[in-house]
Image: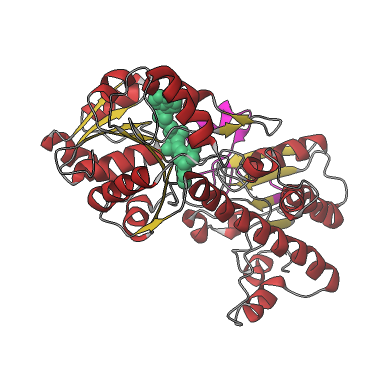
């Protein structure tokens, strides 16, 4: 296969938020796509033209359109899909354990299936965020061992990270350049030509899979370190009695200053996780990256400390946390700071309840947190409100319903402090009062 033409067939392994979107965008170009997922419910829903991912503009319509055009077919059988394709994209999660060790179980399983079914001349592309070197050393070698084929000549191997942002995936796939590296020049060239045709996007050609892997983790680490800087400065600003938001606005008016926003902590499945893809594999643990993790992880406890300064002992205080999601306007709670706050507040014997418009009361209760609906009666006993995820829905929050609330801790600095104080609550922002 020297280049791809419109006859190619693509398998996408993992039909989650990212995989379903990329499979749908490619199938939307008229390319035949097999979408593989180990979850039969996901497969059934896609095969009925239904979208199991919410909050991605345009995705529902695209899944339905592909269903009628018969360009996207889902199945649980990875080997069958791979055998019948000449491009295979892997986009299943690599996570970390509670001890911050890299957990490869999902992707190793997918690679096992690929190795047992790949045919000559197939292009395999890993899109999952990975520690540097994994595409070639961990996965390429495994596929060679299982298939007897040689990477770079018998099959082609490339890495191209997903750099998209939840809520904007389809738009980002079109607008952001696709970073692509291959295990050799030919693998890269074929992958580049695939993406140019399948996504019609700009491509940044990298010198190796390692460089492409490194670039994605570097992007996330940059954000983590930058947020840590904003957090460190916000703690100092608090001490000095100045408002960090006013300061960041002024500082960032200089074109080389890009200070991010401080906050109650960094959650999600990317920024707090990917630094360990460097730290666990040789990055100096006395350096900036590890320190940034520590600073960002300390912000929840620091914020609880601000409450204690204001209220004294939190024993038996009724505390309402707004937002279970790790950030505003998404339904995702991996490493959500709300879960961390809950633990810290329980240690103080406070009574914690959580509201989130993206989750049902059952979903919240099932995570061991009591759900709270928002109305005057239900929040009558609330002593403290903590805004953790700034969902748009909270913009219109009726502050007058918090009749007995003493403190409003704005963990995302997204409310107007004066307005809060007009309702009789003390306003605390992160480095911003
Ligand atoms: N979600 C994001 O915002 C985001 C952004 C950038 C990059 N990424 C990258 O995308 C990866 C996937 O993220 P996601 O949000 O789509 O995950 P997800 O949890 O929404 O979906 C993963 C899907 O893969 C399936 N799966 C797991 N192992 C499998 C296997 N061996 N074979 C077949 N199916 C399997 C699961 O059943 C699930 O449906 C992340 O690990 C990350 O590297 C995600």
Q: Where the N terminus falls, by quadrant?
A: top left
345 w.r.t. 58: above or below: above
**Which residue is depicted at the point 27% across and 46% down?**
194
Report the side of 226 relative to 365 (left or right): right
- Point out the residue furthest to the left here: 69
Residue 386 at what x, y percent from top left?
Answer: 67, 51
Q: Which residues are magenta?
A: 355-384
Residue 367 at what x, y percent from top left?
Answer: 59, 29
249 w.r.t. 361: above or below: below
Report the side of 266 relative to 169 (left or right): right
Q: How many marks?
A: 0
Out of 310 and 300, give the one closest to the viewer.
300
Check if residue 204 falls in the magenta segment: no
Quadrant assignment, res 145 = top left
**Which residue is depicted at the point 61% across and 71% down?**
258
Residue 167 at what x, y percent from top left?
Answer: 40, 51
Out of 209 and 110, give the one closest to the viewer.
209
Check if residue 382 falls in the magenta segment: yes
- Ligand 1: quadrant of the figure: top left
Residue 21 at what x, y percent from top left?
Answer: 32, 42
Q: Where the C terminus falls, by quadrant?
A: bottom right
Quadrant assignment, res 371 = top right
Taking the image as drawn, is residue 426 in sight? no
**Which residue is depicted at the point 77% across and 43% down?**
317
């Amino acid at each position: 296969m020297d280049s791809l033409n419109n006859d190619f067939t693509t398998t996408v392994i993992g039909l989650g938020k990212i995989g379903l979107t990329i499979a749908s965008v490619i199938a939307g170009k008229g390319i035949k796509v097999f979408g593989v997922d180990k979850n039969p419910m996901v497969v059934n829903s896609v095969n009925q033209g239904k979208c199991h991912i919410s909050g991605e503009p345009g995705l529902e319509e695209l899944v339905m359109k592909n269903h009628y055009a018969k360009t996207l077919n889902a199945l649980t059988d990875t080997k069958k899909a791979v055998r019948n394709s000449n491009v295979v994209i892997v986009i299943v999660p690599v996570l970390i354990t509670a001890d911050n060790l890299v957990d490869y179980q999902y992707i190793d399983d997918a690679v096992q299936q690929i190795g047992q079914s790949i045919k000559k001349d197939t292009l395999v592309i890993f899109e999952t965020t990975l520690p540097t070197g994994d595409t070639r050393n961990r996965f390429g070698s495994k596929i060679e061992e299982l298939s007897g084929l040689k990477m770079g000549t018998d099959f082609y191997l490339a890495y191209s990270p997903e750099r998209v942002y939840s809520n904007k995936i389809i738009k980002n796939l079109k607008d952001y350049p696709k970073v692509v590296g291959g295990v050799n020049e030919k693998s890269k060239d074929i992958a580049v030509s695939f993406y140019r045709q399948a996504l019609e996007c700009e491509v940044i050609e990298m010198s190796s899979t390692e460089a492409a892997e490194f670039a994605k983790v570097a992007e996330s680490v940059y954000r983590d370190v930058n947020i840590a800087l904003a957090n460190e400065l916000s703690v100092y600003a608090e001490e000095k009695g100045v408002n960090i938001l006013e300061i960041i606005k002024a500082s960032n008016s200089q074109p080389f200053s890009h200070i991010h926003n401080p906050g109650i902590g960094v959650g999600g499945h990317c920024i707090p996780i990917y630094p360990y893809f460097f730290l666990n594999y040789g990055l100096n643990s006395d350096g900036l990256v590890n320190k940034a993790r520590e600073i960002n992880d300390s912000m929840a406890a620091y914020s609880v400390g601000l409450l204690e300064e204001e209220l004294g002992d939190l024993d038996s205080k009724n505390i309402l946390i707004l937002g279970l999601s790790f950030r505003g306007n998404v339904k995702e709670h991996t490493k959500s700071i709300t879960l961390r706050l809950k633990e810290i507040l329980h240690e103080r014997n406070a009574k914690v309840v959580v509201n989130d418009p993206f989750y049902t009361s059952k979903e919240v209760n099932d995570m061991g947190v009591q759900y709270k609906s928002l109305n005057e009666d239900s929040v009558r006993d609330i002593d403290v409100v903590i805004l953790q995820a700034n969902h748009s829905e909270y913009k219109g929050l009726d502050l007058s319903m918090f009749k007995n609330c003493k403190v409003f801790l704005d963990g995302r600095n997204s409310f107007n402090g004066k307005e809060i104080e007009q309702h009789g609550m003390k306003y605390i922002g992160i480095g911003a009062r």
